[in-house]
Amino acid sequence: MCGRVLVAYASKHGSTREIAEEIGRVLRDGGLDAEVAEARLVSDVAAYGAVVLGSALYAAHWQRDANRFVARHLAALRTRPVWLFSTGPLDRSADAGLLPAPPSVAITTDPIGARGHRVFGGRLLADTPGLDPQVLATHPVGDFRDWDAIRAWAAGIAAALVSPAP
Ligand SMILES: Cc1cc2nc3c(=O)[nH]c(=O)nc-3n(C[C@H](O)[C@H](O)[C@H](O)COP(=O)(O)O)c2cc1C
């Protein structure tokens, strides 16, 4: 066992938050003490034995709060098991679980030495408050999150933390 697990996220319109919350639920179901928090509100990760960090992708970049989280906590992240996820593709291209992190994300996160990085499909709602109509004209609307894949990925993290390989 690794102690408490932090699931930190950066989300502009809520869909990444919902993924983080589901990951937290699966970790708790797996017997872990998991806490879900907005990345920008986490001032210290010392209390956590492992971290899951995720961000929505906009223009092929993580959100600033997620990048700042990495910069703020890099020393601590390097000494803990860390898993990363990105959410974004508004199609089924992420479903096979093979999409790499965009280069800008890899540059930010490579120094962590994370155990894994998974890209999940995203969601764009037509009635998103404040959304520029031009965005709706140029981006597919829909919910492309693969909940079974999200739960399976989180269950793998739970298994790795509950029974670490010798
Ligand atoms: C203006 C705009 C730009 C986007 N750029 C990307 C992108 O570069 N790569 C990607 O995979 N998804 C992109 N997306 C899709 C979002 O990442 C997706 O809607 C995601 O689920 C949003 O997460 P959130 O609700 O947590 O903010 C973009 C969406 C919008 C509206």
Image (tube, grey):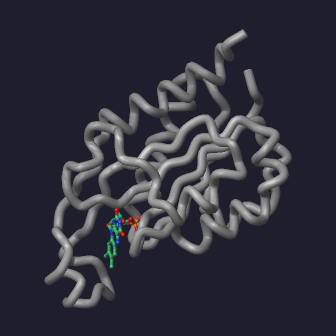
Residue that appears at 45% across and 59% down: 102
**Quarter location, residue 115:** top right
**Quarter location, residue 64:** bottom right
Determine whether 26 is above or below 120 in the image.
above
Residue that appears at 20% across and 89% down: 133
Q: Nearer the viewer, residue 99 or 58?
A: 99
Ligand 1 shows up in the quarter that is bottom left
Residue that appears at 39% across and 75% down: 59
Can residue 5 be seen by looking at this rendering?
Answer: no
* Side of 140 where 147 appears, left or right: right
Residue 19 point in image, percent of width and height: 42, 49
Q: Residue furthest top?
A: 166
* Side of 134 where 17 appears, left or right: right
Report the label total: 0
Q: Nearer the viewer, residue 69 or 18?
A: 69
Determine whether 42 is above or below 6 in the image.
below
Residue 13 point in image, percent of width and height: 39, 71
* Side of 73 where 21 appears, left or right: left
Residue that appears at 42% across and 48% down: 100
User: The C terminus is located in which quarter?
Assistant: top right
Residue 136 point in image, percent of width and height: 18, 81
User: The N terminus is located in which quarter?
Assistant: top right
Can residue 54 be seen by looking at this rendering?
Answer: yes
Determine whether 47 is above or below 32 in the image.
below
**Quarter location, residue 60:** bottom left
